[in-house]
Image (spheres, rainbow, N blue to C red):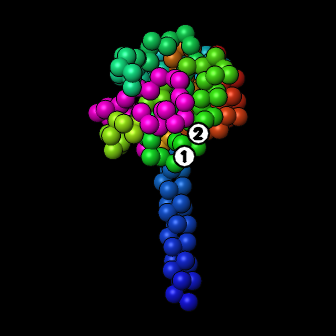
Amino acid sequence: MKKTIIIVVLAGMFVWAIYDLALSSDNKDTADNSDFTTAEENENSGDNSGADSYGLQIGKKAPDFELQTLQGEKVSLTDYRGQRVLVNFWASWCAPCRAEMPDMQKFYENKDIEILAVNLTTAENSESDVVDFVDEYGLTFPIPMDKNSNVANTYQIKPIPTSYMIDSEGRIQYKQLGPMNYEQMVQEFEKMK
């Protein structure tokens, strides 16, 4: 009987947490979405007044950043101007991050896309955890290390993984909170120029 009560209480708490998260996410999305239009809507309306402004909304230019990779090379987002880029924020202990990494590697190998998998280094136990993760999954794309959380703060990263699909002109075309699978990556990639 005690086990049943505990299970019911835990299930109730879990359902409430999901409901609360969804409700707060809906409120945030409503607030975030109220002040922008998509890149396609801007193009169709001929409104280019904010086309070159930077921000985190669809159609805005993605904020630039410069970080050192796990291999010690400096990379910045503007280095990839003219190419389509997937910027992904992750940590080695994150189960959904682990779930999407094989698909992300496959995506990188099969499509003309650049991937910057920004590691949230302040959330890691040690840098060796990141090295082990990269080796375990055979990742070959750059792993910029966000050692001071500056980029995570700029991009307002709350859940991880979070991904931004950025077109060849540096504009955000898609944002995903949570993991993506290969099919989603390809679908959003094909919409970009």
Left or right of residue 7: residue 73: left
Left or right of residue 124: residue 189: right
| Residue 133 x, y percent position in the rendering | 47, 37
| Residue 56 x, y percent position in the rendering | 46, 30
Question: Where's the N terminus, which quadrant?
Answer: bottom right
Left or right of residue 170: residue 65: left
State the residue at coordinates (50%, 56%): 21
Determine whether label 1 and label 2 are within 8 Å by CB: yes
Boundaries of the magenta span: 131-158
Q: Determine the residue located farthest toward the left in the rendered image.
A: 148
The kind of secondary structure element at disc 2 is helix
Residue type beneath disc 2: Glu
Query: Is 79 rendered above or below residue 89?
Result: above
Residue type beneath disc 1: Pro
Q: Which residue is mark 1?
A: 96
| Residue 154 x, y percent position in the rendering | 37, 31
| Residue 150 x, y percent position in the rendering | 32, 31
The kind of secondary structure element at disc 1 is helix
Q: Which residue is mark 2?
A: 100
**C-alpha separation, residue under disc 1 versus residue under disc 2:** 6 Å
- Quarter of the image for residue 167 reads top right
State the residue at coordinates (44%, 18%): 77
- Quarter of the image for residue 47 reads top right
